[in-house]
Every structure is written in C-alpha cells, then in structure tokens.
Image (cartoon, rainbow, N blue to C red):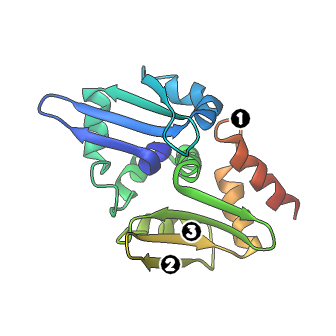
Amino acid sequence: LGFFWGDGCLRKGENSTYLTINITKKDFLNIESPLTKHINWTVKFHFPKDRQEQANLSFRGNRLGKFLLDNGYLTKSGGSADKILSKIPENLKHYWWRGYLDADGCIINNRKNEVSFSSTYDQDWSFAISTFNQLKIDKYFINKVKRENSESSKIALCRLNNLTILLSYIYKDWNNIGLIRKYEKIDKIFKK
C-alpha cells in the first residue's frame, strides 16, 4: 500500500478500477514476491528510450480498487495519507512507510546524509509530520521547488540521529521485504 501510494496509478472506470505500477525491471525482480503474492498482476516489460528496462504491472479489480478509492488513492498526489494509515494496525505501519520509501523516497549517504520523500508541489505532508512527531523526530524540513517545466516538494531529514530513528522504525522486521539497493544505503548510515 505504501509503494502504491508513491508509484501506483489508480483509474476509475464505469464498471471497474484499473491499477498500474511502473518500475525498473531490476527493482521489480527484487520485490516481485511481495508485489505478486496476493494480486495477480499482468506484467509487461519494455525498453523506454535512454532508460533502464521497465516493468509495467497492471490489474483490474473492483474490491481492491474500491478499497483504494475509499482511502484516498485517487487523489493521493497532493493529498494526505492519513486515511489509509488510520486503517493499518500500528505493528504494520512501518511496512507502509517502507513501501513509500522504496517508491518515492531518496536516501543520500555520502558527505551529506539525507532521507527524503518527494511528491507534487502542493503535497499535504501532514501524515509525515504526524509520524515524525510520534517518533519524536525533532527536525525536518519541507522544500518546494518551481521550475520552468515542473513543480515538486519534498520532506526531508538530515540530522543523523533523526535518520536513525526513522530508518530504525521503517526497517524493523527487515524480512527481505523491500528494495535491497535502498536497504544497503541504510545499512551504511547505521554503521556511521
């Protein structure tokens, strides 16, 4: 659900809903098992010009689609994830955040350390702020950028102690669920 919040697309038709995810083939193969365990996605691979091979996952489903519609996934760009997060038991919320980090998160680990989530310019970050407050993360920032052809915003953490708090929360119970390439970056932050 967190991954779909970040990288999923939900379209409502007259009689059904249509769900899609585009992801690199390499990342798809890394997380194929949890993605396909309960949903019978149609998977197609393609080579966009000047990009890595992509996996396009699609699924037509009324029950899951209705659940996603009822919980804000049609208006997720700019909206708050509070509604879906309120439906997830506390002991499973970190999996939602892990999926969201895998989809729309960025981890920088070099001279500068940063974990951020990116979205549309008008994104309602209240759901992230609420989680940060609950975890007693005391410093974060929101950056909004307008360029000639695009607008975006991100919420980010830079202090090592706050990164450790958030990443310890998101990656408790690792169980090999998530993108290995992101987990490896996180492991380097923990070693610092």
- Residue sitting at 52 percent across and 47 percent down? 96
Determine the CA span between mark 3 and mark 1: 23 Å
Asked if disc 2 and disc 3 are in contact, CB closer than 8 Å, the reply is no
Placement of the N terminus among the 4 image quadrants: top left
| Residue 43 in the image: above or below residue 22 | above
Q: Judge by depth and name the residue closer to the eye, 97 or 53.
A: 53
| Residue 13 in the image: above or below residue 37 | below
Type of amino acid at the residue the image marks with label 2: Asn
Q: Judge by depth and name the residue closer to the eye, 80 or 113.
A: 113
Determine the CA span between mark 2 and mark 3: 16 Å
Type of amino acid at the residue the image marks with label 1: Asn
The x and y percentages for residue 133 are: 55, 71
Asked if disc 3 and disc 1 are in contact, CB closer than 8 Å, the reply is no
Q: State the mark number for residue 144.
A: none
| Residue 127 in the image: above or below residue 42 | below
The x and y percentages for residue 164 are: 74, 64
Determine the CA span between mark 1 and mark 2: 33 Å
The quarter of the displayed image where residue 66 is located: top left
The quarter of the displayed image where residue 180 is located: top right
Within 10 angstroms of label 2, few (less than 14), some, or many (20 or more) residues?
few
Q: Which residue is mark 2?
A: 143
- Residue sitting at 38 percent across and 58 percent down? 82
Left/right placement of residue 114 relative to residue 117 reads right
In terms of secondary structure, where does tag 1 sit?
loop
